[in-house]
């Protein structure tokens, strides 16, 4: 732990001591009820502004590398609260995003993601003891769209910062690990000293400050976060209407993304609405409860050669016109990797199962051990599916590969290769079959794969051991 971090924690500890002393001085003073009383059916307008600056941390060929990055994002939506729990904490809401866009710059490059017109209607649901989930009830969100709208301080959980009781001016309370995980989008919190303090009450508004450090995990890697926040609780509306937060984060390099050394500034404004032109009674009827099916995301390959819905545990780690690489994380642990590539169209009868097995064995080379299974079937969409399961070794580590070739009646094809350690086969379960069965190929005459040397080498190229080996 560096000296500056020690100084910060010393200051925070000193503030905590001051808060206790203030509480003793104010013990006999007036207490103010800081209890959320949000009601089902309430309608609000939420405006969010986010600015992030700092570095992405990468490891390239064993050497650390930092890339300067910045993000400026604006998110605005109308929100209709659908259900609350016994403590009047929101559980489910439906939103219409009329603005969700960002400008992301990394080194010399940049992107401008935005939510599509067809996915502006979103349901937010907060399961018990689990993170809030955002999903579109009319179709799958892309990972980019989800990342754009799933910002810290989700309006569905923001009131959980309140103590849920009456407190006196100068009194403080410690934030729970679950609240901090919900607020910051963490998978788990291992330690924190974050406290909130009621420091001002005037004109029907209670002003509260929050500060402290959090150690947690996200995406299977550790992260260290320091936060400072100020928020206002409307004593009449009985809810938080404004939050400004500074978030400093140092995240380790992970299996599904780069590390971070960033500072984020977030402002959330919440105002009551009498009515919403977007959230009409007809639209509200489209709200659905959270299920594994509606929470699936959608991936469309570059060039539109294929697409599929997928479980959120899969993360896209590499994507270009020739190859997409997904990794499956379960409870923070890497379970499997999937390499996906469009194969040049073939108007003939295509590769048969025996030829496919030869291609697979050739691509694995010295890592090949033995075939465990080889089969041919038809997907729900009517596509021909060749499936080959192989056991082998990479650096003396027992590995299982599951290869697929998916083809329609017009010769359009997709190659998929799943790689996992043999010890994780039971945990992997049927994850490959669900992904394969969800593949959709374009109609005949639409764009297909870019040209490759030949049909045989294309399978080997997309599924080589070097590309598919999982990293521990």
Image (spheres, rainbow, N blue to C red):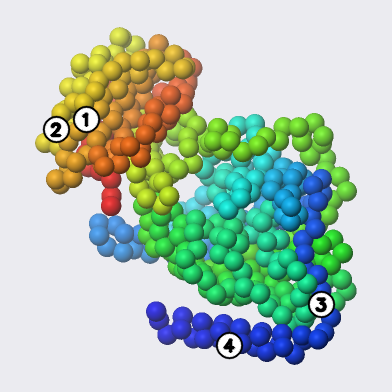
Disc ID at residue 31: 3
Mark 2 in CB contact with mark 1 (< 8 angstroms): yes
Q: How far apart are marks 2 and 1 (CA)?
A: 7 Å
- Earlier-in-chain disc, 3 versus 1: 3
Q: How far apart are marks 3 and 4 (CA)?
A: 24 Å
How would you rate the neighbour count of disc 3 (Cα within 10 Å): few for under 14, some for 14-19, many for 20 or more?
Answer: some
Mark 4 in CB contact with mark 2 (< 8 angstroms): no
Q: Residue at x 65, y 31 (%)?
A: 138
355 sits to left or right of 88? left
Disc ID at residue 14: 4
In the image, residue 208 lies at what x, y percent?
Answer: 72, 74
Give the residue number, with chain letter if any, for mark 2: 369
Viewer-side label of 3, 1: 3
431 sits to left or right of 417? right
Q: Is mark 3 on a helix, strand or loop?
A: strand
In the image, residue 383 lies at what x, y percent?
Answer: 41, 16
State whether residue 119 appears in this view.
no
Viewer-side label of 2, 3: 3
Q: Distance between the residues labelled 2 and 3?
A: 72 Å
Q: In which quarter of the image is the N terminus?
A: bottom left
Q: Residue furthest top?
A: 349
Q: How far apart are marks 4 and 2 (CA)?
A: 62 Å
Disc ID at residue 390: 1
């Amino acid at each position: 732990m560096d000296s500056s971090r020690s100084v910060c924690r010393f200051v925070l500890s000193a503030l905590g001591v001051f808060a206790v002393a203030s509480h003793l001085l104010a013990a006999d003073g007036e207490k103010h009820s800081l209890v959320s009383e949000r009601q089902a059916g309430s309608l609000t307008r939420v405006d969010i502004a986010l600015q992030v600056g700092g570095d992405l941390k990468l490891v390239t060929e064993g050497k650390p590398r930092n890339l300067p990055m910045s993000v400026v994002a604006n998110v605005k939506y109308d929100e209709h609260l659908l259900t609350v729990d016994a403590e009047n904490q929101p559980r489910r809401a439906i939103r219409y995003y009329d603005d969700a866009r960002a400008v992301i710059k990394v080194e010399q490059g940049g992107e401008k993601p935005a939510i599509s017109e067809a996915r502006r209607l979103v349901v937010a649901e907060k399961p018990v003891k689990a993170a809030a989930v955002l999903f579109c009830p009319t179709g799958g969100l892309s990972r980019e769209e989800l990342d754009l709208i799933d910002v810290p301080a989700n309006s569905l959980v923001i009131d959980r910062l309140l103590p849920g009781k009456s407190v006196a001016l100068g009194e403080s309370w410690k934030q729970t690990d679950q609240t901090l995980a919900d607020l910051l989008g963490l998978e788990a919190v291992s330690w924190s000293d974050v406290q909130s303090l009621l420091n001002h009450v005037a004109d029907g508004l209670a002003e509260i400050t929050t500060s402290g450090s959090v150690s947690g995990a996200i995406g299977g890697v550790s992260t260290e976060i320091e936060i400072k926040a100020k928020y206002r609780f409307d004593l009449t509306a009985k809810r938080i209407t404004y939050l400004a937060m500074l978030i400093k984060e140092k995240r380790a390099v992970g299996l599904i993304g780069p590390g971070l050394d960033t500072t984020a500034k977030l402002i959330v404004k919440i105002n009551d609405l009498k009515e919403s032109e977007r959230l009409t009674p007809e639209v509200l009827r489209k709200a659905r409860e959270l299920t594994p099916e509606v929470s699936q995301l959608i991936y469309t390959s570059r060039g539109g050669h294929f697409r599929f819905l997928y479980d959120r545990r899969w993360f896209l780690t590499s994507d270009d016109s020739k190859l997409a690489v997904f990794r499956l994380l379960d409870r923070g642990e890497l379970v499997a990797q999937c390499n996906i590539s469009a194969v040049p169209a073939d108007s003939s009868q295509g590769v048969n199962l025996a030829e496919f097995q030869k291609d697979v064995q050739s691509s694995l080379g010295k890592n090949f051990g033995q075939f465990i299974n080889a089969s041919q079937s038809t997907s729900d969409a009517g596509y021909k599916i060749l499936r080959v399961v192989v056991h082998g070794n990479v650096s003396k580590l027992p590995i299982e590969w599951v290869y697929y070739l998916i083809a329609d009646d017009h010769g359009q094809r997709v190659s998929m290769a799943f790689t996992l350690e043999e010890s994780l086969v039971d945990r992997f379960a049927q994850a490959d079959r669900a992904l394969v069965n969800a593949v959709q190929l374009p109609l005949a005459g639409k764009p297909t794969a870019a040209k490759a040397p030949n049909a045989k080498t294309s399978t080997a190229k997309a599924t080589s051991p070097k590309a598919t080996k999982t990293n521990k």
